[in-house]
Amino acid sequence: MMIRKLSFLMPKNTYKKVEVDIYNEEKICVVYVENNGYSIYVNDNENEMFLIKTDISPEEFKSEKYAGDKDDFINLIKLLLDQIYAGSDIPEYEEQHHEFVFLKIIDLFVTNTFEAIDDDSDLHKTIELAFIKFDIDLLNLSVFNNKGD
C-alpha cells in the first residue's frame, strides 16, 4: 500500500494570472502554474479553459530551444482570437495579431505584472483539479500505449 498526502502530490505554487484586453470587453486570461503549465481561457469562462502541460517558464519561451512549444501556444491564442472576433464588424487590420498577444502575455509574466490567485478561490481549485485530471489522462494513455510491449 502506498500513501501520499495530496499537498505532496500537488505542492502549493503561486498561480499567476494575466489578462489581455482584446476587443469589446473580451479578454484572454492566462494562468501560469510553475512546473505544471498554463491555463488559458476567454473572460471568466473557466468551463472553456484549455490546459497547456509544460515545464517551460515564461522567461524560457524567448529561447529558440522551445520554438515548437511557442508555436503551439501561439496557435491556441489564434484560436481564441478567432472566437472573439467571430461576428465582429471591424476591419482585419484593427484585430490584434496572435503573436503580438502572446508576446504581451509573456512580458506581463516576466515583468511581474500579474495577479496572484488565492489558494482558496474557485479558479485555483478548478485549475488544480484540471491538471490532476490531465496527469491521470496522460498516465492512462501511457499505460494503454505500452500494453503491447
Image (cartoon, rainbow, N blue to C red):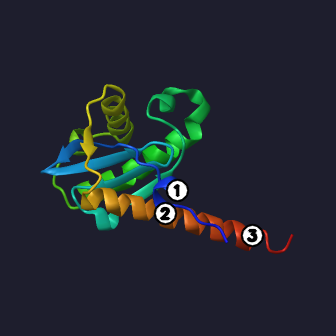
- Residue 72 or 59: which is nearer the viewer? 59
Kind of residue at badge 3:
Asn
Tell me the amino acid under the disc marked 1: Leu
Q: Which sits earlier in the primary sequence, circle 1 or circle 3?
A: 1
For residue 145, the mark is: 3
For residue 123, what is the image quadrant?
A: bottom left
- State whether residue 38 is above or below residue 87: above
Q: Which amino acid, by three-letter code, is at mark 2? A: Ile
> Is residue 95 in sight in this rendering?
no
Write down the residue under mark 1: 9
Please tell me whether residue 19 is drawn above or below residue 120 in the rendered image: above
Q: Which residue is mark 2?
A: 132
In what element is the residue under mark 3? helix
- Seen at 56% across and 62% down, the residue is 4
Q: Nearer the viewer, mark 1 or mark 3?
A: 1
Observer able to see residue 101: yes
Q: Is mark 2 in CB contact (under 8 Å) with mark 1? A: yes
